[in-house]
Image (cartoon, helix red, strand yellow):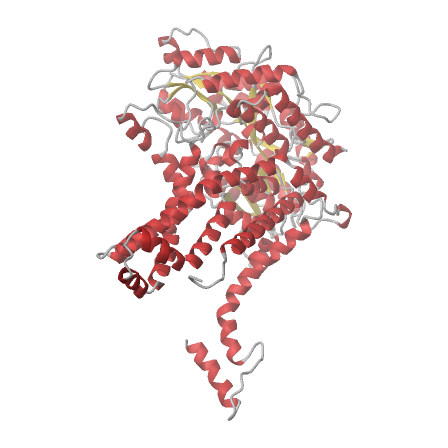
């Protein structure tokens, strides 16, 4: 979503016929009529609990063992029967369509946005978090809070950064990672050979995420205090020129069979640097040993480095017939059950626990590049804003794509983007 | 068949001596009609007509994250105005037009060519027909994966790049960016590969309807086989089929979604090649959930398809009989 926060969902995206989903889910009337006919909502009868039966949804995590793990957590819970559904394909479309019907899950993972709160789809969770509120990183509370109410429990933090091969840097005589985006482009060009590209920014050449990073790097904001676009700044155009330069150089790995969220291009040696997320760390360590270094996305123009703190939060469906049972389960799994939280964060792909006390216990994240990632996610991390809508996000992506792919004037384009974002904001707050 | 006969019998015996067709909606002869048409009709109603009606209703409301908007959210035709003035939506319609310009004539020519060739083959006709028809059974998603992960992979070991390397051509990142827009080649070849066989079958069926005597008569009159008989006998004979095929190709082009979604960066959400359906999908589904505007856009698109189809039918004479 915002700056492609969905880590590996895209992996499963290939597997689904979307036109069918449009036909069914889009005009949810048909789906509603159908689901009214079929009684199977995926819930079990609450056999091992005392009556309540809950349905819980996850998007499809790519790492081995994850599905078995969430099944196991659900089975360990004794106060209600919990069935888990593992949703492959476009999770956003699936969950948002499901929430319009009676068959929606009681507990689900997602990202908070204002529309779902205004539609009364999510239950406030302040009470189950009250005891641990001081133990949760501030940004993880902020991204799940709207108008003073907390709606989501942060499950995991997934920082996104750049990984590189120190051996290739050494061979090219480069002594340190870049500190500005301009330097990054220089280094990428220098590292490019006939077999190895300088950097992999994903299939879109970074145009789908770097605009958002510029905003944070330059100290601007998505939405200003006046509830208007907070990034109408001439330095944005200057920053965009660097992305143009990168795309026009030969240094960008484009057309790799896998996208940025999959570490294959790095482990297959197709590129010297790659955009990635913490979840790829175990695979990279296994394939490349200690030939791994990490650095945050370098600052644009005179700005600071940035790390996007993606991740997932757990929500309770406010329209569930078992709201209290669903809250109790969510508290048990994502607030009290520190053992399972640590298991979820460290035993499969790596994620940073969204609890300060657990971060100290996470041995896997206490040394080497993983520790560096944790540090830079705390120092340079930014997270999505619940008021930032997909339309606004697309407007920023389009701005950079039009500038990079079609040579549009960055200043003119930016004013159009600001206009789009402002009219969207006026629709929400006006 | 059994059903038809069974229901037909009591109708005729009950009517007595003078046989008069009964006009009851649900009984007698009509029962068989409902047996056959009923299940399809129910499906059509549930999956097509009710959703279309519902989205027409939704298009008049500010319906975000809901399919049952409250009456105070009624906005009249605002959603239509927003969509029609939306630069991205208009641009997506242009994208479609470019796509149609590529894909419609190519698919038409390729399937007609194939049909003529296969129709001429004297051996293993069934084999050739099946071989060319088979891709039609393949889903766009699966084909997209094959095109993306093996044939048109942008790195050095992709099939096309390997072949190009033999000739000393540098690697091409087929699916990245818009300069040059190589992705059209990938998308158009994929669509032709899948669709060609189906239209080929339609053309073969039509070709076999053209009476052999016409050709014989023409030869007697001195016509030469080849271009002359093709333009003056074959093409007029294929007229109704050609018009139908053209319409189907155009409608399917409007509905392009799967291959753009699966092949292009950011799930097809790129300004230079966003198709109308991808645009609407992102507006109404996903985290967008603006079902009011999405429905308005869908209706505009449906209307556009209807107009184009009607115009096409009028100019090309859909429904007129062959060769007239």
Q: Is residue A74 above or below residue A304?
A: below
Q: Residue at x 53, y 27 (%)?
A: A208
Residue A34 visible in rendering: no
- Left or right of residue B278: residue B70: right
Residue A259 x, y percent position in the rendering: 44, 30
- For the C terminus of chain B, the quadrant is bottom left
Front residue (pair B233, A155): B233
Q: Is residue B202 above or below residue A169?
A: below
- For the N terminus of chain B, the quadrant is bottom left
Residue A311 x, y percent position in the rendering: 55, 30
Q: Is residue A357 above or below residue A19?
A: above
Q: Residue at x 37, y 33 (%)?
A: B152
Q: Residue at x 53, y 22 (%)?
A: A407
Front residue (pair B262, B25): B25
Residue furthest out toward the bottom: B17
Residue furthest out toward the left: B123
Residue B285 x, y percent position in the rendering: 59, 42
Residue A338 visible in rendering: yes
Q: Residue at x 71, y 40 (%)?
A: A118
């Amino acid at each position: 979503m915002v700056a492609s926060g969905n880590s590996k969902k895209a992996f499963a995206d290939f597997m689904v016929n979307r036109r069918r989903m449009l036909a069914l889910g889009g005009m949810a009337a048909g789906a509603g009529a159908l689901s009214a006919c079929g009684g199977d909502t995926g819930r079990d009868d609450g056999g091992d609990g005392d009556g309540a039966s809950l349905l819980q949804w996850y998007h499809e995590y790519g790492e081995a063992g994850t599905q078995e793990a969430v099944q196991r957590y659900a089975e360990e819970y004794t106060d209600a029967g919990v069935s888990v559904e593992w949703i492959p394909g476009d999770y956003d479309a699936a969950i948002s369509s499901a929430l319009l019907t009676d068959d929606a899950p009681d507990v689900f993972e997602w990202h908070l946005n204002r529309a779902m709160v205004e539609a009364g789809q999510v239950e406030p969770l302040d009470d189950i978090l009250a005891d641990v509120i001081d133990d949760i990183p501030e940004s993880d509370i902020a991204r799940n809070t709207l108008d003073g109410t907390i709606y989501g429990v942060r499950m995991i933090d997934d920082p996104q950064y750049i990984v590189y091969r120190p051996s290739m840097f050494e061979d090219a005589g480069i002594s340190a990672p870049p500190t500005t985006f301009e330097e990054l482009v220089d280094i990428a060009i220098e590292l490019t050979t006939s077999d190895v590209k300088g950097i992999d920014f994903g299939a879109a050449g970074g145009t789908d995420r770097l605009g958002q990073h510029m905003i944070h790097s330059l100290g601007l904001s998505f939405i200003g205090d006046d509830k208007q676009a907070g990034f109408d700044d001439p330095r944005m155009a200057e920053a965009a020129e660097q992305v143009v330069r990168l795309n026009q150089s030969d240094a960008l790995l484009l057309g790799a069979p896998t996208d940025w969220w999959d570490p294959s291009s790095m482990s297959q040696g197709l590129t010297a640097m790659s955009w990635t997320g913490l979840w790829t760390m175990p695979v990279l360590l296994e394939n490349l040993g200690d030939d791994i270094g990490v650095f945050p996305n370098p600052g644009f123009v005179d700005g600071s480095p940035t790390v996007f703190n993606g991740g997932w939060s757990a929500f309770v469906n406010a329209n569930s017939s078992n709201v209290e049972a669903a809250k109790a389960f969510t508290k048990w799994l994502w607030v009290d059950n520190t053992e399972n939280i640590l298991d979820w964060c460290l035993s499969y792909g790596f994620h940073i626990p969204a609890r300060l006390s657990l971060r100290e216990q996470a041995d896997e994240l206490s040394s080497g590049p993983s520790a560096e990632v944790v540090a830079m996610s705390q120092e340079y991390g930014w997270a999505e804003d619940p008021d930032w809508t997909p339309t606004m996000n697309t407007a920023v992506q389009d701005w950079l794509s039009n500038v990079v792919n079609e040579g549009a004037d960055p200043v003119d384009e930016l004013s159009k983007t600001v206009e789009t974002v402002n009219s969207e904001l006026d629709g929400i707050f006006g | 068949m059994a059903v038809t006969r069974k229901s037909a019998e009591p109708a005729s015996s009950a009517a007595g001596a003078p046989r008069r067709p009964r006009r009851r909606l649900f009984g007698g002869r009509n029962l068989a009609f409902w047996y056959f048409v009923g299940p399809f009709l129910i499906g059509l109603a549930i999956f097509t007509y009710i959703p279309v009606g519902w989205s027409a209703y939704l298009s008049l409301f500010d319906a975000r994250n809901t399919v049952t908007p409250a009456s105070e959210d009624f906005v009249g035709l605002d959603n239509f105005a927003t969509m029609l003035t939306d630069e991205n939506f208009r641009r997506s319609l242009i994208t479609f037009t470019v796509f149609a310009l590529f894909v419609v004539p190519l698919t038409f020519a390729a399937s007609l060519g194939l049909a003529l060739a296969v129709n001429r083959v004297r051996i293993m006709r069934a084999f050739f027909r099946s071989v060319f028809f088979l891709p039609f059974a393949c889903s766009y998603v699966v084909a997209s994966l094959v095109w993306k992960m093996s044939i048109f992979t942008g790195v050095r070991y992709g099939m096309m790049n390997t072949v190009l390397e033999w000739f000393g051509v540098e690697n091409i990142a087929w699916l990245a960016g818009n300069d040059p827009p190589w992705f059209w080649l990938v998308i158009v070849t994929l669509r032709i590969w899948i669709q060609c066989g189906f239209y080929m079958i339609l053309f073969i069926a039509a070709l076999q309807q053209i009476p052999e005597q016409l050709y014989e008569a023409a030869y007697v009159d001195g016509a030469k086989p080849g271009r002359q008989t093709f333009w003056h006998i074959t093409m007029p004979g294929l007229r109704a089929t050609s018009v139908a095929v053209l319409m189907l190709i155009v409608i399917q082009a409007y509905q392009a979604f799967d291959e753009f979604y699966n092949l292009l960066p950011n799930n097809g959400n790129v300004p230079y090649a966003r198709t109308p359906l991808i645009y609407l999908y992102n507006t109404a589904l996903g985290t967008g959930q603006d079902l009011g505007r999405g429905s308005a856009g869908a209706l505009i698109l449906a209307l556009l398809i209807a107009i184009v189809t009607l115009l096409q039918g009028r100019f090309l004479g859909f429904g007129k009989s062959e060769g007239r």
